[in-house]
Amino acid sequence: MEGIMKTRIPVAVVGATGLAGQQFLAALENHPLFELVALAASSRSAGKRYRDAVRDEQGASRWFADGPLPEAFADLIVQDGAAFDPTTVGLVFSAVDGDTARSLEGKYATTTPVVSTASAYRYEDDVPLVIPPVNPDHVELLSLQQERRGWKGFVAPIPNCTTTGLAVTLAPLVRSFGVELVLMTSLQATSGAGRTPGVPALDVIDNVIPFIPKEEEKVATETRKILGALGASGIIAHPAPVTATCMRVGVTDGHTESVFVRLGQAASKGGVTEALRGFEAPPDVQDLPSAPRRWIEVSDDPYRPQPRLDRESGGGMVTSVGRIREDDALGNGAKYVLVSHNTKMGAAKGAILLAELLHARGRLG
Amino acid sequence: MEGIMKTRIPVAVVGATGLAGQQFLAALENHPLFELVALAASSRSAGKRYRDAVRDEQGASRWFADGPLPEAFADLIVQDGAAFDPTTVGLVFSAVDGDTARSLEGKYATTTPVVSTASAYRYEDDVPLVIPPVNPDHVELLSLQQERRGWKGFVAPIPNCTTTGLAVTLAPLVRSFGVELVLMTSLQATSGAGRTPGVPALDVIDNVIPFIPKEEEKVATETRKILGALGASGIIAHPAPVTATCMRVGVTDGHTESVFVRLGQAASKGGVTEALRGFEAPPDVQDLPSAPRRWIEVSDDPYRPQPRLDRESGGGMVTSVGRIREDDALGNGAKYVLVSHNTKMGAAKGAILLAELLHARGRLG
Amino acid sequence: MEGIMKTRIPVAVVGATGLAGQQFLAALENHPLFELVALAASSRSAGKRYRDAVRDEQGASRWFADGPLPEAFADLIVQDGAAFDPTTVGLVFSAVDGDTARSLEGKYATTTPVVSTASAYRYEDDVPLVIPPVNPDHVELLSLQQERRGWKGFVAPIPNCTTTGLAVTLAPLVRSFGVELVLMTSLQATSGAGRTPGVPALDVIDNVIPFIPKEEEKVATETRKILGALGASGIIAHPAPVTATCMRVGVTDGHTESVFVRLGQAASKGGVTEALRGFEAPPDVQDLPSAPRRWIEVSDDPYRPQPRLDRESGGGMVTSVGRIREDDALGNGAKYVLVSHNTKMGAAKGAILLAELLHARGRLG
Amino acid sequence: MEGIMKTRIPVAVVGATGLAGQQFLAALENHPLFELVALAASSRSAGKRYRDAVRDEQGASRWFADGPLPEAFADLIVQDGAAFDPTTVGLVFSAVDGDTARSLEGKYATTTPVVSTASAYRYEDDVPLVIPPVNPDHVELLSLQQERRGWKGFVAPIPNCTTTGLAVTLAPLVRSFGVELVLMTSLQATSGAGRTPGVPALDVIDNVIPFIPKEEEKVATETRKILGALGASGIIAHPAPVTATCMRVGVTDGHTESVFVRLGQAASKGGVTEALRGFEAPPDVQDLPSAPRRWIEVSDDPYRPQPRLDRESGGGMVTSVGRIREDDALGNGAKYVLVSHNTKMGAAKGAILLAELLHARGRLG
């Protein structure tokens, strides 16, 4: 990251004590644009110093994000999310769970921009679902959202972590060849489910769990929205059907996805490889502080990508692709495997990247 | 199993010391039709008692199949596979590795029936690839094989362990609806790769390996052959394209497969479920000693099948299916998840089942 | 098990929906002495059929014990444990969690015998801690308990699952050589912590957790009580100090323990082996329905015992021992490794074994 | 690391293609004192560019160390270790396997210093076993070695990876309290066994392997030698008996050890903590390029250390300690858990640290 701005934008993290919230803190340490000044969580944590709010009953630390708890944030007093005044900051990062996300985020957004990892608003007509290198122009939909709802702020959610890697890799294929059909099977990491309770160890030792509630519907709907066209009254979903089977495997971080795609025209293995390798974002997205040098890295090694070896690529912001093959079975078909970091590009760091885009495009006031 | 025949057929296991070979021994203990009388392996093991041939340098047992080493076989002297006289038995089970399988099996077959887990002969025109409940009539091709090659015996291979579960579940769909396209992603257990060296622990701890050499080609070719029609000069492959991506995960036994299929006509979730649940083999196959009561078990629990919980169903001979869903994306599409035991139905026990069929159909002299 | 008694004792399982409770149901199917007639759990489950009480919100079965849910029990209506009338049965099996165990078990015991897997009463002076093959005579202490407390029933807890394997293997060493000091490090399976939430997958993937709250104190206190002498007013703890470090590893079932012990007199490796192999319980214990043929199995294979390979030995009732070595460092020292099934011998099946002993010794009325 | 020396010492890595050898390459990139100029391995790899020597038959990279293969070394031509001329370098790092280590290292040492991860020479009277922060003065024994054997070079091995963490943590206890008895149980990572074949996945999925050949003897002998006193004709082993049970668990990197120790005098938990936290090496060791800021980090969190969370501390050079408890059972006893990175401090990076010490103390000519 470049030098830190003279005056950074004060931001809050709501839902700060959970696994996703912790990752916001880890990622906001020394951020050049955003200065974390407020933390909020449920009433149970309210009033505690953050370092104490992430301790268990025995006093042991329940901080699980990379690296130690940033000292700069450890003594911030956790506020009650329900009582938090969003006008004290210029931006709220929300890592709140589905149930309370709807009410809290809507309340904050009346005055303040909200960037969220929750799904509560993802499927609203006037809510864009933006992955900065894929569909940055969809942020324009926020104007409609503000107008319709009479909000000074807005809610800008990021997609589900399983959608992200898929959409990032489909974007260059849509551009180069067109995409007509997508079939995906995911092997998802356990961190996506949080930690308490999260995925029980008994589920993934010597085992695979073939179902993740609501995940397949999210992937199908979100991917088509992200790849869709910005219309006057919302996003026109991309016409290609997307179908998925989502499973859980014994991996800590990094979702692996097996993708079959029917392209709009014939493409060789080399052509698909070139399209993915050559994928670039618009210049202003490329210059965002959290942007990796490349969004997609393609390996020729048939044993890659692997979640343990590739998930941290580009600080967890890169989607790693391998095993690109032509697929005659599908007709103009291609197949490949991707690995995407579900709690970095797919969660907190991805949300911060979106906030950086919103700043670059003048949406943060 | 029912009562033991008065006079059982004397059989040999070649490649007896490896993981697959051991599983033949475990499965042949007290078999009603076959009496294991001879064991063969590489020259390194030749001349040793079997119990000593499966010890390491420190004297520790390297027996890894279920249950203890059957005492009845422990003191058999291991013969050199290259020098073994197949006329001393009525049937040879071959668990030899790819490289030597071609020469050894061909040699044995000049005089003696060979049932093999190796891939050496699978793709020959005059070699059937039989899963007893799916395509028992393909055994008739053995007559052509014997005639063309001038063999008194034959080579009857079983398919790759990853093909087996897929073909078993496609068979009822072919019958009920027709099948036009198959896309499969496998999450394969480590036991399929044997044990020395087998899959290194470093590959599957907190990780997924997205490639298994030659596996995808095997699945595509074998599935279409198994589901194909018996013609005068060989099998006419089923016309539906089959495409697969095969991965390795940290599971001991039991391959999990995510299947997408385009059917020949529309079928509801209930219809697909009924077709799979109702799948039956011909009466003589149903009566084989190793046949489970049902070949396919379908679960309505969305969290099933799971390899650890379902692999041992029916003694490892059942294919467990769940997550049946209609799939509009494909057009007359369906998707489901299956679990199949790769070293039981998919290897030694599957080979014994095939031998039982060959016996029932009068092919063992 | 032998034939079923004409009139079996009606029993209840309280805490029936949890992982430990489920295992009681699995183990009581077709039990020759006990007829399961009542199930109780928290008020949340009360009034539901058992099969529905172990479903999640999506309707998926949360039954996790071996085998399918026994049909004989599936339609029993779950009662509220707080309102359950223990006089309707001859024995209550309690699988209640620590917090409510104290009040519920004490209440039931005023009228009815209670055999419990909970720790609530384990450390009371008038409560014996019995492993049938080790200290069956300690059941006599129940008379004192009934007298002192004015109870018609009693509470008979089993020890912590980590204690069980240790105490079983120390018993023959105490008899043959005396034991002066015990140091143990455990590598514990995840099933010991239940399932919801249980051990999070993130804790044990590519990891070890070096702490299990209260476990080390339990092991030290309980082992000395079990190996202690029955005195007039309670158990006189065995004098040998016991110290433990308890860790969690990524294993589903089966605790592995590394034991160092200073014996009362010099003993060769052969002597220790013989003492462990020769361990026998009194004849009436040996005849209990759940008793395995041998309580301890000793392997000479240096790579055994292993939890995955040995935990199910004797239906999970055997303690498997290996790696017996003399240990000069300790002075008359020995060291060995054991594997014990934490949810069978160490939980529900161990409690049923204790109930069988109580029946044999006339304690069940 | 500080600035790179004007003229670095040219060094070779022998055994460069294995897992340990790869880690030397990863650690020598941009090393301030050593310039890697030559690579050697078995004749099978000789003549190939290094990047090709670490490819498999399919052309896939078998490079497994952290980060990508350093470009600076990728095109070095691998030499045949048996024919390698050690006078072309100022120091040889040997990562050769046990069998050939003895002959090769002895041959090289006639002219050139050798720092080795192999065990071949560890137990010779005139060979020191040095962990720089623990017993740096033992390097003086190299003079005796050179004199006795008539070597211009020498062989300086590092200890076994399991010994390292134990010896590092015992050193401050020896200094502060004296140590009279050590009992240790290890839970070792799979990377210690290399990769081909390494530990089979089947061994550690849902499992523990209770035996690692020769490991326990190595730990006992080496620990006492490292903690011993330098005498005129060799090291006088520390008198405290050391006994270990060594196991393998499903962890990629980082050995966990449960240690019980009887101290020479009573010490409180606070005292032991302070001794470990206060551990410092002599100033010249502290200044070595690979030295971490602290050698031991002590956590008060009862759930630490954990291999996945703590192994990379200080670049893998720190020994993490936690769960410090007084232990009355032992008499002046203490117990704790440690995590040490087996392939960093315990292998290649530890060997480089030793080479840095040899340089600092004028042993590299």
Image (spheres, coloured by chain):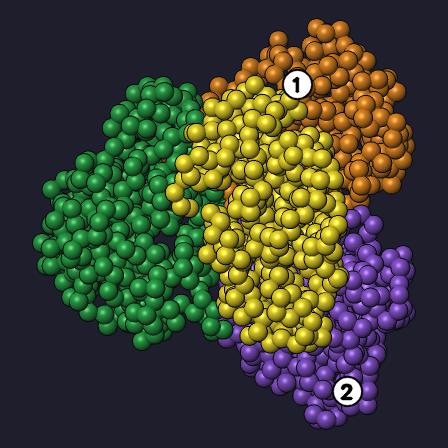
Chain colours: A green, B orange, C purple, D yellow
Placement of A127 over or under A84, stated as above or below: above
> Residue B213: which disc?
none
Q: Measuring from the top left, give residue B197's x and y in whole percent.
A: 66, 34
Query: Residue at point 81% right, 23% down?
Result: B43
Amino acid type of the residue tagged 2 in the rendering: Gly
Placement of B147 over or under A332, stated as above or below: above
- Of residue C31 and residue D40, the one placed in the foreground of this image is D40
Query: Residue at point 72% right, 31% down?
Result: D103
Query: Residue at point 29% right, 28% down?
Result: A278
Q: Quadrant location of the N terminus of chain C? A: bottom right
- Tag 1, which secondary structure? loop
Any part of residue D66 in sight: yes
Where on the picture, by quarter, is residue C105?
A: bottom right
- Tag 2, which secondary structure? strand
Amino acid type of the residue tagged 1 in the rendering: Ala
Disc 2 chain ID:
C
> Residue B120: which disc?
1
Disc 1 chain ID:
B
Query: Residue at point 42% right, 39% down?
Result: D5
